[in-house]
Amino acid sequence: MVAHRLLIGLAGLMGAAGVALAAASAHGADASRLASASAMLLFHATAILAAGALLARGLLHGGIGLVAAFGFVIGAALFAGELTLRQYAGHALFPYAAPTGGMVMIASWLAVTLAAVAAGK
């Protein structure tokens, strides 16, 4: 399925960006804020891969599971993008981008729960 391949590609990009931010936070002066951005990208890249595997096995409801997986991508991108932009450019992506990304990730985790329940019917 095209959506699954797209999710795998996005997870790979998120993982690579997460490692790059981890290196920047470890080696850059006053770049400690990037550690949380790195963690969000790496953790949610793994969550996307897991959601794809669960979707392929029918353990998550297809539509809800895909929405959750893409929510992980959007939420982590908003959160990490905001923190990275603040670190390097000194301004925000847009007002409340990081909290919005966090809320999208929370909603996505709740959607995974709903998708698991819906798949069991």
Image (cartoon, helix red, strand yellow):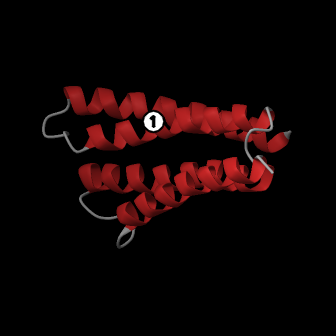
Q: Nearer the viewer, residue 37 or 102?
A: 102
Q: Nearer the viewer, residue 9 or 69?
A: 69
The residue most toward the front is: 121
Q: Which corner quadrant of the image does residue 48 belong to?
A: top right
Image position of 118 with respect to 20: above or below: below
Q: Residue at x 32, y 30 (%)?
A: 22
Q: Which corner quadrant of the image does residue 46 belong to?
A: top right
Image position of 39 with respect to 23: above or below: below
Q: Secondary structure at mark 1?
A: helix
Q: Nearer the viewer, residue 121 or 6?
A: 121
Image position of 121 with respect to 40: above or below: below
Q: Amino acid at mark 1?
A: Phe
Q: Is residue 46 left or right of residue 70?
A: left
Q: Is residue 37 left or right of residue 108?
A: left
Mark 1, residue position: 43
Q: Residue at x 28, y 31 (%)?
A: 24
